[in-house]
Image (spheres, helix red, strand yellow):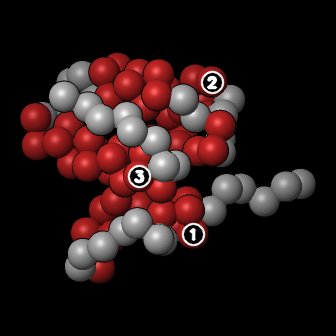
Amino acid sequence: MSKGFDMELFLAGVMTGSPATRQRHLRQAMAIQTAIAARWQRNNPWTWKRKHLVWFLNHSLNLKTEATRYYYRLTVKLIAERLKKSWLES
């Protein structure tokens, strides 16, 4: 059995802020990872494309409040920064 992808280690270099903020980003990144893995069987962020993150923001969060969507967009920006991608979202 293979070990799961360590999202905390993946984001460690780009996460800043208080411990509560870091935990929120980690929790949200793991939720994003779970949703993308369920939909596209891509558990590893290194295999993600922009469309996967856009899908998550548009479909998984469509019934959430604007504040929740805002915080998830911040986490997506951290993931894009870690992947060294310029997936800026409007």
Q: Quadrant of residue 17?
A: bottom left
- Residue 77 visible here: yes
Please name which of the two marks, 2 or 3, marks the residue nearer to the observer. Answer: 3
- Mark 3 element type: helix
Q: Give the label on residue 9, or none.
A: 1
Foreground of the two, 5 or 79: 79
Residue 23 as seen in the image, left or right of residue 62: right
Q: Where residue 79 sits: x, y (%)?
A: 43, 50
Q: Residues within 10 Å of mark 1 (few under 14, many from 20)?
A: few
Q: Where residue 54 sits: x, y (%)?
A: 38, 25
Q: Give the label on residue 40, or none.
A: 2
**Residue farthest to the bottom, as pictured:** 19
Q: Residue at x 12, y 34 (%)?
A: 65
Mark toward the start of the polypeptide (2 vs 3): 2
Q: Amino acid at mark 2?
A: Trp
- Mark 1 element type: helix
Q: Residues within 10 Å of mark 3 (few under 14, many from 20)?
A: some
Q: Amino acid at mark 1?
A: Leu
Q: Quadrant of the C terminus?
A: top left
Q: Residue at x 48, y 71 (%)?
A: 12
Foreground of the two, 45 or 2: 45
Measure the alpha-carbon separation of dots 2 and 1: 22 Å
- Mark 2 element type: helix
Mark toward the start of the polypeptide (2 vs 1): 1
Q: Residue at x 58, y 23 (%)?
A: 39
Which residue corresponds to mark 3? 81
Q: Residue at x 30, y 35 (%)?
A: 88
